[in-house]
């Protein structure tokens, strides 16, 4: 169970078999889509396609393991993760931003090393969700609600190689991450929304370097 479900959910399911559903008010949800995968899979042997997909998603899984983030599921060549559920995390937006940046960079390296025209399109949104396990067979932890739908729309309306975030997520990241305004975007089912591109995290100097910089440039 621990390999399929979050530990706390697995323990609850063992004690109380049945439906588990909880509301989480502060969660950031990420969707990743492999751009170019469909074209590649059409001209590669099925075994090679699975091997490539396994390499890519295993790299994503390794990144998730290092962060306060929960992998939710894979859907074909799409990957979904969240922070803030089932365990609350104060900096859920930052954790998901770190994951998105690492995923973007990992895929670029894999594509370069393998000579494949592969990129990712990533979308992030933050808000409240319902999360849990429903059904009787093959239990799986999942998220539901408008936050999930909007995160999916952020990915679908995004740009290959870029990380598109909603205004709700941008508000949580401002001052801690590099953001570039994309402007108003027509989002299917949502209308026009202001969106941003997550470019990276600010360079953080160690205390000694920061002190030396202040001595050299006292007016900054």
Image (cartoon, rainbow, N blue to C red):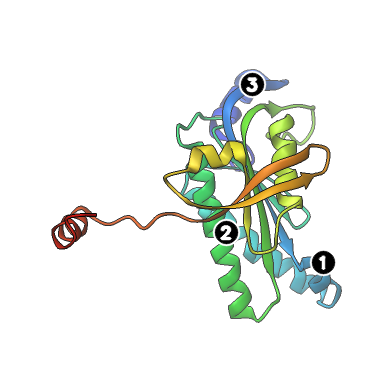
Q: What kind of element bears circle 1?
A: helix
Q: Which residue matches tag 3?
A: 22
23 on left or right of 69:
right
Name the residue at the bottom extreme: 115
Q: What kind of element bears circle 3?
A: strand
Name the residue at the front extreme: 219
Which tag, 2 or 1, sits closer to the chain's start? 1
Q: Is residue 196 above or below residue 189?
A: below
Q: Whole-Å distance between the Cαs marked 3 and 1?
A: 36 Å
Q: Nearer the viewer, residue 91 or 209?
A: 209
For the residue carrying disc 2, how many other residues have a C-alpha within 10 Å: few (<14), some (14-19), or many (20+)?
Answer: many
Q: Residue at (63%, 74%) from the top-left corner?
A: 111
Q: Position of residue 168 (x, y in %)?
A: 59, 36
Say if mark 3 contacts mark 1, CB within 8 Å.
no
Q: Residue at (15%, 63%) from the top-left corner?
A: 216
Q: Position of residue 99 (x, y in %)?
A: 53, 51
Q: Is residue 142 above or below residue 161?
A: above
Which tag, 2 or 3, sits closer to the chain's start? 3
Q: Residue at (64%, 21%) from the top-left corner?
A: 22
Q: Nearer the viewer, residue 76 or 193?
A: 193
Q: Position of residue 198 (x, y in %)?
A: 55, 53
Residue 144 seen in the figure: no
Which mark, by number, is residue 103? 2
Name the residue at the left extreme: 215
Which mark, by number, is residue 38? 1
In the rendered image, which quarter is residue 166 located in?
top right
Q: Whole-Å distance between the Cαs marked 2 and 1?
A: 19 Å
Q: Residue at (58%, 61%) from the top-left corner?
A: 104
Residue 65 seen in the figure: yes
User: For the N terminus, which image quadrant?
Assistant: top right
Which tag, 3 or 1, sits closer to the chain's start? 3
């Amino acid at each position: 169970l621990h390999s399929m479900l979050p530990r706390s959910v697995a323990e609850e399911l063992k004690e109380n078999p049945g439906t588990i559903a909880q509301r989480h008010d502060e969660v950031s949800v990420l969707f990743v889509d492999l751009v170019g995968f469909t074209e590649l899979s059409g001209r590669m042997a099925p075994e090679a396609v699975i091997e490539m997909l396994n390499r890519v998603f295993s790299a994503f899984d390794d990144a998730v393991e290092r962060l306060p983030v929960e992998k939710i599921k894979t859907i074909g060549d799409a990957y979904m993760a969240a922070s803030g559920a089932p365990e609350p995390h104060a900096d859920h937006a930052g954790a998901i931003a770190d994951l998105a940046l690492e995923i973007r960079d990992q895929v670029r390296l894999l594509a370069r090393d393998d000579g494949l025209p592969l990129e990712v399109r990533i979308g992030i949104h933050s808000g409240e969700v319902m999360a849990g396990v429903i059904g009787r067979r093959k239990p799986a932890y999942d998220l539901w609600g408008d936050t999930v739908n909007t995160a999916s729309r952020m990915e679908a309306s995004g740009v290959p190689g870029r990380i598109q975030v909603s205004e709700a997520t941008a508000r949580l990241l401002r001052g801690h991450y590099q953001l570039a305004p994309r402007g108003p975007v027509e989002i299917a089912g949502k209308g026009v929304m202001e969106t941003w591109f997550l470019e990276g995290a600010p360079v953080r100097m160690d205390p000694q370097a920061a002190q030396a910089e202040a001595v050299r440039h006292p007016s900054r």
